[in-house]
Image: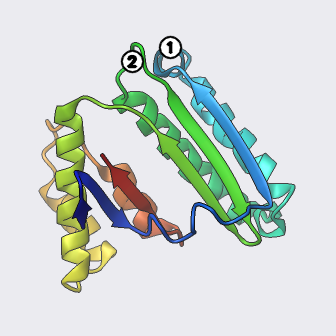
Amino acid sequence: MTEKNVSYYGRFNFIDENAPSELYLSHTYSPIDLISYWGRCGKMSEFYTKFCSQSIERVQNEYVSNYVSTIFNELIENAAKFSVWKDTNIIIELKAYFRLIKFTITNYVVKKNHDIFNEKLQRFYGRIEKGETVDDIYFEYLEKKDSNDSSSGLGYLMMKKDYPVHFGYKLS
C-alpha cells in the first residue's frame, strides 16, 4: 500500500512506534566503515543478540539466539552493501517488548536500488496475498536463478523461509 510516496510491506506497523519498550538501543554507522571492515557486521549482530538476551529470556536459548544473530547479520550486511557510501549514515535501532524484538535499520540507497527492491517486495507480497507459500517462491527462485545475476535477493527469501519472524518495510 502506498501513501504520499511511501510504500509499506509486510508487518512494518506491527508494533506501534510510540509503544513504550523495555529496552532501547540506537547506533549510527558509516556505510563505508562497515564495507571496509566487513567483520564488524558480524560482531554488531552478536552484540545486539547478546544485548537482547539480557532482557528477553527466550533469546537466551541457543537456537533462538543463533537465528536472531543470523537475521541481524543479514540485515546489517544488506544495509552496508546497498547504502550510498558517502555522506550518509546507517541508523540501527533495537527495541524489545516483552517477547518481541523490533530491529529497525534506516539507510539511504540510490534510486535504482530503491526501485529494484520496491519491485521485488511488490512481487513477493503480491504472490503471498494470492496464496503462494514462501517455500514455493523460494524453490521456484532457486530453479530459475541466473548464475550471472549479481543481485540475488536470496538472503531475504531464506530468512522468510527458515525463521519464524515477521518482516516489515517502509520505503520512501
Q: Secondary structure at mark 2?
A: loop
Q: Position of residue 62 (x, y in %)?
A: 76, 61
Check residue 108 in the rendering and tell me which mark sits there, or answer none. Answer: none
- Look at label 1 and name its amino acid: Ser
Quarter of the view holding residue 151? top left
Q: Check disc 1 and report its element: helix, strand or loop.
A: helix
Label 2 crowding class (10 Å Cα cut-off): few <14, some 14-19, many 20+?
some
Left or right of 34, for residue 11: left
Asked whether residue 151 appears in the rendered view, the answer is no
Above or below 105: residue 15: below
Confirm or deny contact between disc 1 and disc 2 (CB under 8 A): no
Q: Is residue 29 left or right of residue 98?
A: left
**Left or right: 58 with respect to 123?**
right
The picture places residue 37, in percent across and down from the top left corner, at 56, 17
Identity, as a three-letter code, of the amino acid under mark 2:
Trp
Q: Residue at x 35, y 60 (%)?
A: 157
Single out the mark in the foreground, 1 or 2.
2
Q: Which residue is denoted by mark 2 in the rendering?
A: 85
77 or 108, nearer to the observer: 108
Residue under pointer 1:
36
Q: Residue at x 78, y 55 (%)?
A: 23
Q: Position of residue 19 (x, y in %)?
A: 66, 66
Give the left or right position of residue 23, taking residue 91 as reference: right
| x, y percent for residue 113 | 22, 36
How crowded pointer 1 is (Cα within 10 Å; few <14, some 14-19, many 20+) is rated as: few
Q: How many marks?
A: 2
Residue 145 higher or lower than 84, as above or below: below
* Mark 1 vs 2, N-terminal side: 1
In this view of the protein, which residue sits in the foreground, 5 or 142?
5
Of the 4 image quadrants, the one containing the N terminus is: bottom left
Work out how far the residue at label 1 is from the one at label 2, CA to CA, in angstroms: 11 Å
Residue occupying image coordinates x 50% and y 13%: 36
